[in-house]
Amino acid sequence: MRSLIERLHREHTLASDEFRVLLSQCEEEHLSFINALAREVSLANFGNKIFIRGLIEVGNCCKNDCYYCGIRRSNQLIERYHLDEDTILACCRHGYELGFRTFVLQGGEINDDEMMIRVVTSIRKEFPDVAITLSLGEKNTSVYERFFQAGANRYLLRHETHNDLHYRKLHPEGMSLSNRLRCLDDLKRIGFQTGTGIMVGSPYQTIDTLVEDILYIEKLQPEMIGIGPFLPHHDTPFAKMPSGSMKLTLLLLSIFRLMHPHALIPSTTALATLAPEGREKGILAGANVVMPNLSPVVQRSKYSLYDNKASLGAEAAEGLLLLEKRLEAIGYTIDKGRGDYSAH
Ligand code: SAM
């Protein structure tokens, strides 16, 4: 196992069967070993700096009905909201004062594209030096092009799974893996720094589907890779499904770091929700980004993708000092720069 991991470190890839072995037979000591190697790679490329992104959850209204997601269309038990243009800009102003130089606008998929284009244009005009990341789901090619022309730089769209059968167990009819992949191809071609990824331990995921995900991400070469555990939401069809495991999440984070030494990889809110030290463990397994929440505090609990989602304390933009302290405790500091992808 050690020699497999060392080869992954050296060559940035393995054969499918070898990934299968790594995923299915990784004991605690091997996990510590791969986490340490991945950490070294992060330190070599980014130093002990962690980039911060200000996350603005622009709305929880969604036309999709993904079985895993708390803001799915069929969930009639959550209060719906969407932030207007002025409120989003006010969040950006607050974030800019706190030192954020990347804003991530994420939301359910019913958003008004014209309004988002206006918002991006306004953010770009008022803050020429920030990076604007969008995570607004599947759109037509022309909408992505207009987002880019308006000044957006990055787009996050997890593919969720690269296995068609698995995709159909996570999503109802009407959503398709092929459209998701078309979106990712569009985003790359248009020139976005593009992020994709998966939920670790999503229902019906297997070692084989994970290997397919690893190979797809290797082929796509995204600039950002989002890997966090699946966590159940009590008002979804997957309410009784178990959460993804910390061990497998940390293993996958390290595998992706060894395969993609320069990628921007967040230690996700879901990981921080799964366990009290989750965020730190993610960083020590090779992640180099955290995304504190800049949304208006009154709306935060409504963006409930899964139960107990962390949005306060070190997960909150106003908790930056606390985050700083927690990162210092493991030997890292916050980098307030834009933190663009660079292959050097
Ligand atoms: N609609 C956009 C999209 O699909 O990319 C952005 C919002 S969507 C809620 C953002 C991400 O949340 C999804 O890609 C999914 O991986 C994650 N997510 C949703 N439900 C989750 C759950 N129960 N556990 C962990 N992550 C979840």
Image: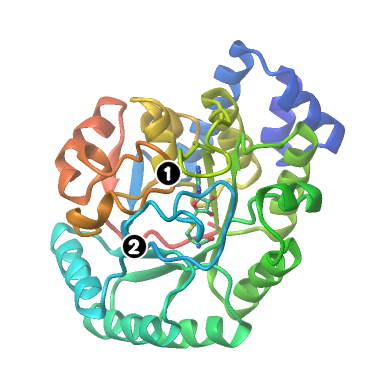
Residue beneath disc 1 = 288
Quick check: 94 left or right of 342? left
Q: Is residue 197 above or below residue 138?
A: above
- The span from disc 1 to disc 2 (Cα, nearest Å) is 32 Å
- In depth, the one of 182 and 332 nearer the eye is 182
Q: In this view, does 125 lie above or below 217?
A: below
> Residue 127, how many percent across, how many down?
24, 77
Q: Give SS at disc 2.
A: loop
Helix, strand or loop status at disc 1? loop
Residue density around tag 1, few if under 14, some if 14–19, many if 20 or more, within 10 Å: many
In the rendered image, residue 151, in percent from the top left (x then y), is placed at 40, 82
Query: Which percent across, then down, holds residue 209?
Result: 76, 41
Q: Which residue is drawn at 20% across and 59% down?
A: 296
Count of number-bearing discs: 2
Give the residue drawn at x 13%, y 63%.
Answer: 97
Disc number placed over residue 69 in the picture, else none: none
Q: Badge 2: few (under 14), some or many (20 or more) residues near its Cα, within 10 Å?
A: some
Tell me the mark number nearer the camera, choosing from 1 and 2.
2
Q: Which amino acid does label 1 sit on?
A: Asn
> Compared to 19, does 30 lie above or below?
above
Q: Is residue 50 left or right of residue 285?
A: left
Which residue, given by chain and number where applicable, does mark 2 sit on?
A: 80
Q: Which of marks 1 and 2 is nearer the N terminus?
A: 2
Along the line of sight, the residue nearer the viewer: 60 or 189? 60
Q: Which amino acid does label 2 sit on?
A: Arg
Q: Nearer the viewer, residue 121 or 160?
A: 160
Query: Residue 105, percent across and down?
Result: 37, 66
Left or right: residue 251 compared with residue 209: left
Drawn side of residue 260 relative to residue 312, left or right:
right
Q: Residue at x 50, y 30 (%)?
A: 285
